[in-house]
Image: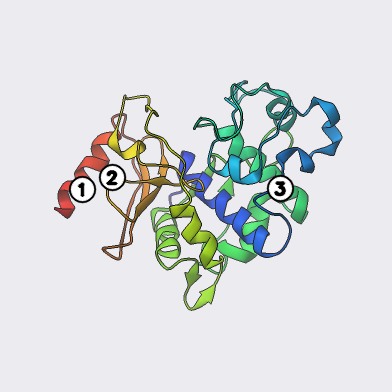
Amino acid sequence: MVLDHLYSASKTYTALAVGIAQTEGLLSLNDPIAKFFPEFGDMAVDTSTIRDTLQMVSGKKESFPRTSRLNWALEYLKSQPVCAPREKFIYNAMSSYILSCIVEKVSGATLRNYLIPRLFTPMGIDNPQWDVSPQGQNSGGWGLHLTLDDFAKLGQLLLHYGEWGGRRLVDSDFVKAMATDLVDTKDFRTPLGPSVDYNNGYGYQVWRCRTENTIRADGVYGQFCIVFYDYDIVVTILSHCETFLDILDAVYECLQ
């Protein structure tokens, strides 16, 4: 069995954990991030909410390397925002890490362990591996390792609005909001330059694609789980392609 690194496609699983935690009454999307980190006191310079953080409009950029041995949560929370929350889309993987920390704080389990009985085991995903920070929290925004078949199950779960095998795993309204509660990304540029597939809006740790009613979990080098609601299909790809934008073009050519 080969496990592949999903890179930023890991973020979508983090969003699902937030949705499950909300259904369990452990948090609200309107909760301020700083509320969950009283130990940092006045050092926490953050006025964003969980919803802002899900949508990458917290106003913060990544301000330290992921290889740092510092306290990642503290470094994120004490970093000065570059703009007010919801003013601008700023893609920031550390936002997803903060969500991972919050899930752990409210549940008492790491993000991975929280999802095992609620998502991974019901979907037949055995022993998923997820990288951790120096403080032991799952990285959230990257670092999840799954097989291609297991990654494809994510798309099927989203396609059926949180239902798996007749069992409700994630609240349907939350899954619908993941795909429809969007922020503007028209000015976003990938490392490879502008792309139509990254300028249609960003939901709860998913990108809206170039066609209507289509979203995807997205990892650098071409880790894609694309959900075409109108076609009732899911396309899942694991690759290592430096020019990953070509993969999305190829998918749409096949659908024409």
Q: Which residue is mark 1?
A: 252
Instruction: Give whichever of 184, 220 is nearer the camera.
Output: 184
Q: Give the image quarter of residue 115.
A: bottom right
Q: Quadrant of the N terminus?
A: bottom left
Residue type beneath disc 1: Tyr
Residue 106: where, in percent of width, then height?
76, 53
Q: Which residue is mark 2?
A: 210
Residue sitting at 50 percent across and 60 percent down? Answer: 175
Residue 60: where, in percent of width, then height?
60, 27
Q: Are marks 1 and 2 in contact (CB under 8 Å)?
A: yes
Instruction: Give whichever of 154, 228 is nearer the camera.
Output: 228
Residue type beneath disc 2: Arg
Relative to 23, is 15 above or below?
Answer: above
Residue type beneath disc 3: Asp
Cα separation, mark 1 vs mark 3, equals: 38 Å
Q: Residues within 10 Å of mark 1 (few under 14, many from 20)?
A: few
In this rendering, would 119 be left or right of 148?
right
Give whichever of discs 1 and 3 has the lower sequence position.
3
In this rendering, would 170 be left or right of 240?
right
Q: Which residue is mark 3?
A: 31
